[in-house]
Image (spheres, rainbow, N blue to C red):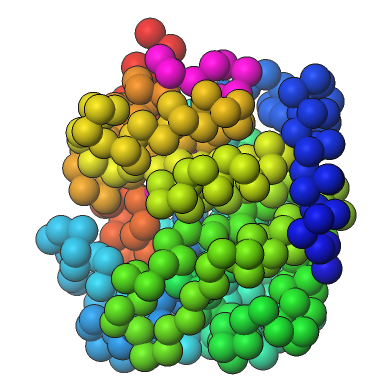
Amino acid sequence: MTNRRDFIKQATALSIAGSLSPMAFARQTDNGNSGKMIWANLLHLGTNMWEDHPYLEWPEGVYKDDYQCKNSAEAYAWMRGYRPFLIFNEPVWNDILQNMVTAGMNMVIIDLGDGVKYESHPEIAVKNAWSTGKLKKELAKIRELGLEPIPKLNFATTHDAWMGEYSRMVSTKRYYEVCRNLIDEVVDLFDTPRFFHLGMDEEVAHHQMTYNYAVMRQNDLWWNDLYFYIDQVEKKGVRPWVWADYGWHQPEVFFKKMPKSVLQSNWYYGKDFDVKTNSSVNFYNDLEAHGYDQMPTGSNWDNNDNMEYTVEHCKNNIDPSRLHGFIMASWFPTIEVCRDKHKEAISQIMSAKKRFYR
């Protein structure tokens, strides 16, 4: 594992290199995407991100196709709480991908979690999880559609229920071994992708108030483990990527310790884009002021206007050399009852794109 002193030296070198030359990382150049703005969609294969007791009981195999989500809170209930089987509908998945192509999107970030039966740790997989062969076929299909697949495994303790028993071994020798194995295998399965999203959001106590088992890292331990994940990803020739909300709570520490090599996704899902009153929105500007590369994230979680506002704000406040693109993160499971919400999300991206290029 990288110790803290060595990592700071490494991070400083990477930061300097990144400021001098875009060749330090393959930025928007792989898979024929040279110079293209990224328009990405975050989709879920695995959904076991939370430890808490399920908000709604959902018997195995029952997908309630006749049920329609009336609001985001109801859809969210389907994703809360650990369930030992895959919550996923393949026809909906295929429909979303096709709609993304029609909308001119070019990247899909796949939250894998325990939705894959990894060869290194098959014990993590839920029932009906994809085999590695199935995943490889889907990745080939995605690329044929003109979309770039990017893996995501969220290692934040608030969102790591997908790790099963290993989520209760955080920062131990066995835990590091499992994380290393999973990162290595996923990078290989994705044929060395441009990016690897490590999550790392919301690891604070109040986000675990309803959990049956709560654990959080803080101070140097949080950074030590982040550096470990970064090391594993960079050793494989891939650029690490994280949610940026740690910086909301401890900006001075964040800007002192977060390497410029790590792609940042700040996020905000509301309508208030006044930087004087909204610190989450202002953090886009803070990241820009400190020279970080960004992939801002919007959502149709709360309203139908957020993505356009996000694009407009970031277009006006982030230097084009550091603005890689945008992510739509609807946070709805890939199931029939949420098909319309996914279509709505893609429609928002289409409107946001028009606003960006006008």
Q: Quadrant of the C terminus?
A: top left
- Residue 347: where, in percent of width, then height? 32, 35
Residue drawn at the location 36% of the way across and 90% of the way down = 212
Specify whether 162 is left or right of 53.
right
Residue 128 is at least partly visible in this image: no
- Residue 81: where, in percent of width, then height? 36, 81
Residue drawn at the location 71% of the way across and 84% of the way down = 172
- Residue 114: where, in percent of width, then height? 57, 77
Specify whether 347 is left or right of 147.
left
Residue 181 is at least partly visible in this image: yes
Range drawn in magenta: 316-329
Q: Residue furthest top?
A: 358
How many numbered marks are there?
0
Q: Residue furthest left?
A: 70
Where is residue 202, by image quadrant? bottom left
* Above or below: residue 67 compared with residue 128: above
Is 271 included in the stretch rendered in magenta? no
Residue drawn at the location 77% of the way across and 48% of the way down = 8
In-front residue for pair 4/76: 4
* Above or below: residue 238 compared with residue 260: below
- Residue 76: where, in percent of width, then height? 27, 66
Residue drawn at the location 79% of the way across and 79% of the way down = 177
